[in-house]
Image (cartoon, rainbow, N blue to C red):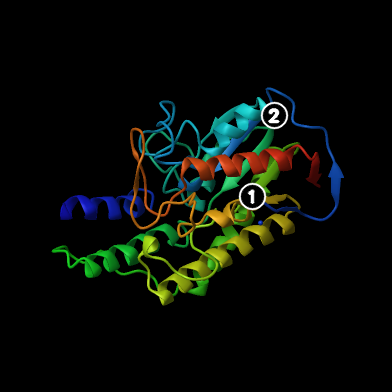
Amino acid sequence: MEVRLRHKIAAGFLAFGFAACQTAPNVRAIAPLEPGARYVAMGSSFAAGPGVGEKSPNAHPNCGQSTSNYPKLLARNLKLELVDVTCGGAMTANILTISQHNGLLPQIESITPETRLVTVTIGGNDLLLARDLGIASCNNIIAAKSLNSPNCGTHANPLADEAFQILAGNLDKIAREAKARAPNARIVFLDYQAILPENGNCEAVYLSDNELEVLRTRQFRYAEIVKRTAISNNIEFFSAYEATKSHDACAAMPFMAGAMSIDGASWEVPNFHTTQEGMTAIANGLENYLRQGTNAN
């Protein structure tokens, strides 16, 4: 039982380790996305959807990509031709230049001049967000339950400013490269959905008040960098956080796994990762936003 508990706690961060939206200035009206338009989805596990629905047979087996993540739901609703290259554990470098797994190109290579929509959910792994949530909660569970288990590791508390600066630079590169590759595309940056409550604490996350505040602040700072990058590059920003903020891991109806992974139909949602309800909320909110017919230029 202790081994199983430790496996469930650790699996999420080891393996995949505001409903408001904003556009940049100089907004212009554009035609709606036509059925069959090419849509490229890039990102990490918060887009790939490990544990959600069924595992995609068309994705790399190590990516933890779901058949019902928000890109696939959005593509079905808008009847778009989806190229889903999202992959659990991805960092900004895996979008720009570095292959994440054998046989995978950097994600940005999927963007072509014919692409009409690009969504990007990336950056949390650059800041060790899911990893540090997992480590902190794992250590606290072991202590609380007096388990005969080794320490889960040491988390960055707090994270150095340099990590945020590097992330900002890489997000800027992604925005500029995506615009250059697909000049006629709508490019939408998303932040992460609500993980922790804006106020208070709860047993579901197994974090001390100080740990929760440090990691919550890290997510807020991450979201601000994503939003600022979108504005400075005249592309679009949709806040997955705002679309789900009433459903964090401590909520009465959470759309987010807490410190323990959640058993799904055929695989597990890792700890501190998005459930099917969260993916659906993001897809629906993003669809409503895209149907408004505005874009930044």
**Dot 2 corresponds to which residue?**
114
- Could you tell me the amino acid type at mark 1? Phe
Using the image, determine if residue 269 lies above or below residue 223.
Answer: above
Q: Secondary structure at mark 1?
A: strand
Q: Compare residues 36 and 98 and report the one nearer the observer.
A: 36
Q: Is residue 210 above or below residue 33?
A: below
Q: Is residue 38 left or right of residue 166?
A: right
On the image, the x and y values in percent for residue 254 come to 48, 52
Outermost residue toward the top? 36
The x, y position of residue 282, in whole percent, is 59, 44
- Name the image quarter holding residue 99: top left
In the image, 246: left or right of 297?
A: left
Q: Residue furthest front?
A: 252
In the rendered picture of this protein, how many numbered marks are placed on residues?
2
Please report the residue visible at 44 percent of the width from the left and 70 percent of the height from the top: 212
Residue 105, numbered circle: none
Amino acid type, residue under disc 2 in the picture: Glu
Quick one: 143 or 189, which is closer to the camera? 143
Q: Which mark is residue 189?
A: 1
- Nearest the viewer among 52 and 176 is 52
Pointers 1 and 2 in contact (C-beta within 8 Å):
no
- Residue under the image location 45 percent in, 48 percent down: 90
Gap between marks 1 and 2, in whole Å? 19 Å
Identify the residue at horizontal 68%, vertical 38% (top origin): 287
Q: Residues within 10 Å of mark 2 (few under 14, many from 20)?
A: some
One can see residue 153 in this view: no
Q: Which of labels 1 and 2 is toward the front?
A: 1
Q: Earlier in the sequence, mark 1 or mark 2?
A: 2
- Residue 157, quarter of picture: bottom left
Secondary structure of the residue carrying numbered label 2: loop
Residue at 42 percent across and 58 percent down: it is 130
**In front here: 104 or 257?**
257
